Image: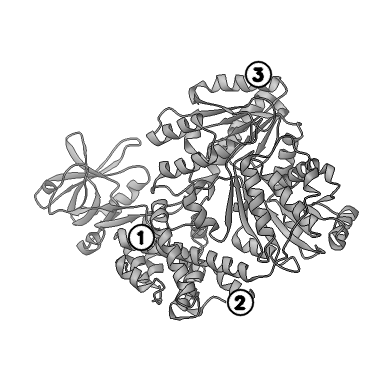
Amino acid sequence: MRPDRLNPLFVAADSLKGVGPGLARPLERLGLTRVRDFLYHLPDRFVQRRAVANLDEASVGENIVVALTPVEYRASTGRGPLRVLASDAAGNVCAISYFGRASYSGKKQLPLGETRWIAGRLDQYGQMLQIVHPDHVTEESGAALGQLVEPVYPLSEGLTQGRLAALIHQAVAGVPELPEWIEPGLFDKMKLPAWRDALELAHKGEHGPARDRLAYDELLANSLALMLVRNANRARHGTPLAGDGHLRARIDLPFALTGAQTRSIAEIEADLAQQAPMLRLLQGDVGSGKTVVALEAMLIAVEAGAQAAMLAPTEILARQHFETLKRMATGTGVEIALLTGRDKGRAREATLMGLHDGSIPIVVGTHAIFQDAVQYRNLALVVIDEQHRFGVGQRLMLAQKGKRTPHCLAMTATPIPRTLTLAQYGEMDVSRLDEMPPGRQPIDTRVVAVERMADVIAGVERHLATGQQAYWVCPMVRELESEDLAAAEARYAELKLRFGDDVVLVHGQLRPEAKDAAMERFASGGAKLLVATTVIEVGVDVPNATLMVIEQAERFGLAQLHQLRGRVGRGAAASTCLLLRSGALSETAKRRLALMRETQDGFRIAEEDLDLRGGGELLGTRQSGDTPFRVANLEQIRRLLPLAHDDARLLIERDGGLTGERGSAARLLLYLFERDWGVQLLRGG
């Protein structure tokens, strides 16, 4: 149960004065649904203004606060602006300009002959000084001078800076005092403010220590929760599994295992033989052979007389794994079943019976394999594919299914930089597949200017005429999903005119059944060209698709470009990836696209991606959710995570865990950052 003193922070956003149904939508788009969310919605930057006695003291281009008295309205003909001429204390005249609908409020805000305090940017228009659309107009000097340092927040359609700032101010004002959870020596050494002070300062522009404090809290909560999970897991009893190798010897492999595969299998085998349940992450690039490693692990369980289950995030991926595993395991005689939410009637009943009586030793499926109706005779190993789609909470739910806690092997095709592995998977041991199996052809990657769109479409036509298939990924518009969709739908309409029914469209707004049907049509060869936003399923395997076009490639993070490119090059034929770029590219974008041409090593790309994004943009922030953090940026993760990790260990090993004085404060921290599965484990474990 969440401690009572935190309840005011978790009430709904509409408990704040001024939030009605109209504001709820735009706030929701920013993830601001509870009071707590407003506290951690930190400013992107601050506008600094200088108060001046008159315009002679100011420079053009500067943000200022100055007292001006309106003397004349000058309305333009047609659609021009309303200009309010106003003079300062020294008699200088400045035009305050309002365009469009704002001109109605211009006269209201600036009555002739009455002095007002104006905050805005001073510009020059011809011979005259002007301020366009002032940021603030107030009657009192105090109110304007209070705006000398003003936060600029990330917004969504339907919200203004002033409105959001007022709500955040209200949320911060109601924050309770909380006890200190950071180790006292470290707290003093880092010269950090207390939690409540840090929140106030971070919204007022006191950047350094206040922002560091809030980021550190988030990293500490995460480290602590993962450590509790790890410790609880080690204290549990699993089933030691030792196989004799008779089934594994009969796996049908197209080529010999790589050194990395052999090493990872040995690490897994050693873990499975232990009493404590395995908790291991298998990281491997697209096509590095994770499925073979998973099959070896599952066969160890079967050789030891137990059952294994493999969980995939979508039905299409589950079917794909099922086909691949069945093909490789043909010679072993082991029965592998598929179980998804779509299965009904007799077939489903037969599978459930087989799992219950143990005659089906391996099952592959979606979340359906963990529903209450599904009972196992002796489930001892769970393999989770595309790990990042399942939070730690879900990983723990799976642990309840066996008689004893099953061993867990998680897999991801997203290469994660070493810096972030600790942040995301601190409770797991990690194996890396950093070699490619022989026989995989490199993908020919080219960068093409968007002006050559007609050539690209003609190239796609020639490609499809050979009987092969292609993907076309549409740009990602950061802020507005609606624009994303519009871009994809417009491109789809254009390509449909050219290619007719050979084109299908997939995007995140489609109903799951419609999305699956479109993917299925493409996977089975019924459609030749798949147009998609970035939702193309990770891991979708269509060997006949050998061309990938990515529009406005400069908008994507490196890791994401690499993931998308990995959709092709999965068969024997040579594959091509075309990165369409716009005219004006930043230095970072140029470097990114050059790196894509240069290398196909996912681990190198992931590390470089971190360096290129720097601290300014969180790893794939708004695009791929590659980090579990909302407050800590990349630079802070690198600098503060090792400290937070050590602090968490100290709390557990020296300071009595969550029981002592600092421990009860840390418990509040876990709930505050919703890492409370760490606390629940202590109860349930």
Farthest residue, direction left: 90
Which x, y percent locates residue 494? 61, 28
Left or right: residue 107 compared with residue 41:
left
Report, in whole angstroms, how far the alpha carbon at label 2 lies from the one at label 1: 33 Å
Residue at horizontal 84%, vertical 49%?
334
The residue under label 1 is: 211
Tell me the residue that label 3 is attached to. 462
Please say whether residue 477 is visible from this viewpoint.
Answer: no
Answer left or right for 214 relative to 143: right
Q: CA distance from mark 2 to mark 3?
A: 62 Å
Q: Position of residue 664 (x, y in %)?
A: 47, 78
Q: Label 3 crowding class (10 Å Cα cut-off): few <14, some 14-19, many 20+?
A: few
Indicate the amino acid at tag 3: Arg
Q: Nearer the viewer, residue 191 or 488?
A: 191
Which of 195 and 254 lies nearest the eye of the viewer?
A: 254
Q: Position of residue 600 (x, y in %)?
A: 54, 34
Q: Amino acid at mark 2?
A: Arg
Count neighbours of disc 1 (C-alpha within 10 A) and say few if under 14, some if 14 to 19, many if 20 or more. Answer: many
Q: Earlier in the sequence, mark 2 or mark 1?
A: 1
- Which one is closest to the eye, mark 1 or mark 3? 1
Q: Which numbered disc flags the more N-terminal residue, 2 or 3? A: 3
Which class describes the residues within 10 Å of circle 2: few (<14), some (14-19), or many (20+)?
few
* Residue linked to disc 2: 683
Quarter of the image for residue 257 reads: top right
Q: Secondary structure at mark 3?
A: helix
The picture places residue 285, in percent across and down from the top left corner, at: 59, 41
